[in-house]
Amino acid sequence: MALPLPGPPASEPPLPLPLSTIPPGEQNPSDTTPPPLPLAGTSPGKSELHTYMARLNGGKLYPVQSIYNPQVSSVRLPKNSGLPRNLRKTLSHHDKLSNRLTFIPAALYKSASSNLENHQPSKQVIRTWCDADVVCFDVDSTVCLDEGIDELADFCGAGQAVAQWTAKAMTGSVAFEEALAARLSLFKPSIEQVQDSTRYNSQISSGIDELIERLKARNTDVYLVSGGFRQMIKPVALELGVPLENIFANQLLFGTSGEYVGFDPTEPTSQSGGKAVAVQHIRQFMKKCRYKSVVMIGDGATDLEARQPGGADLFIYYGGVQMREAVARKADWVVSDFHELMAYLA
């Protein structure tokens, strides 16, 4: 029996940047009758995947996004991505064979951001965004689709227990330093395990590479400010062209035999409120003439903390991976796709 496709959201404000519809002949966006999906055990083709992705995103796709390319290693998708199992399997084939970063379309992830009042930016918010001379990005669930510590824990066999602590840390229900120490104590990764885990694909949010290139072309500096680990973030920074000195993140510590001995407590991002301290440092000391306007983009309570006097002037919540409504409601602007931000950068 064919499975029905989810229809477009009941009411969704139009994005600032027009999207292209599915090419004629594949699917009529005005046709509300969903085409049948292939049954489990069959191999869906490229057209079927494009059609399904388009329906998940309200019948629209960005022309620059490629859903499936058999010549390139595909990607691993979470069970809650909204895709039927047989489509997930097609996209997940050989997900760890490539040593390059993988870019995943934002259409794969459903967001509730359109239900929030701050989904539509005010004129002042737009002006601040366009005038920013530095943009700080969270890494986990923003630049990357996963939480780095969860992936490392999963690699070491402790994924589920660690993920529960991560959820608490991201919503701010426990102190970040407490959650960080508790998570690492559950699996105590060796230097060899960290190195081995970073050899696999990093899953990068669709559009982040274009956004960073657009910002750099406007002479806007880019920083990565993360509660994750430098050892895992460096490959991401190199791929995206972000200078390594523009990384503010935690540092894992190892003994003479490579065994885990702890993390560097002097890193500001190892503490609650640490991202605010890091952004304040960036604003005051990372440029001779000081930055005038700073924007923080992320998805967690620690990112929201960065918006304060002397820190970030604007907090943009990125909901393309996780929608934490308690945090999103307090943001100046909520987006679910980086192309929404690029639309305002002429």
Image (cartoon, grey):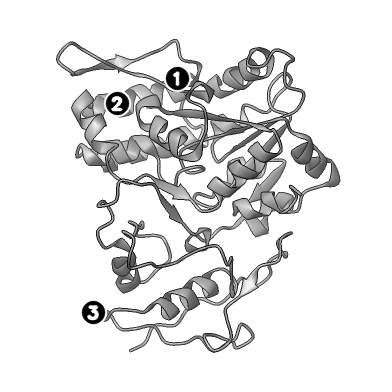
Q: Residues within 10 Å of mark 2 (few under 14, many from 20)?
A: many
Label 1 vs label 3: CA separation?
46 Å
Point out which mark residue 184 bears.
Answer: 2
Q: Which image quarter: residue 328?
A: top right
- Which residue corresponds to the image point at 34% horizontal and 83% vertical from the top-left? 38
- Which residue corresponds to the image point at 44% horizontal and 34% vertical from the top-left? 238
The nearer-to-camera label among 2 and 3 is 3
Q: Which residue lies most toward the left here?
A: 257
Label 2 vs label 1: CA separation?
12 Å
Q: Secondary structure at mark 3?
A: loop
Q: Secondary structure at mark 1?
A: helix
**Residue assigned mark 3:** 41
User: Mark 2 or mark 3, which has the lower sequence index?
Assistant: 3
- Residue 340: give x, y in percent of width and height: 67, 54
- Seen in the picture, residue 108 relative to 183 is either above or below; the reply is below
Identify the amino acid type marked 3.
Gly
- Which residue corresponds to the image point at 45% horizontal and 39% vertical from the top-left? 140
**Residue assigned mark 1:** 270
Q: Residues within 10 Å of mark 1 (few under 14, many from 20)?
A: many
Identify the amino acid type marked 1.
Ser
Identify the amino acid type marked 2.
Leu
- Residue 123: give x, y in percent of width and height: 85, 46
Q: Which image quarter: residue 281?
A: top right
Label 2 vs label 3: CA separation?
39 Å
Q: Secondary structure at mark 2?
A: helix
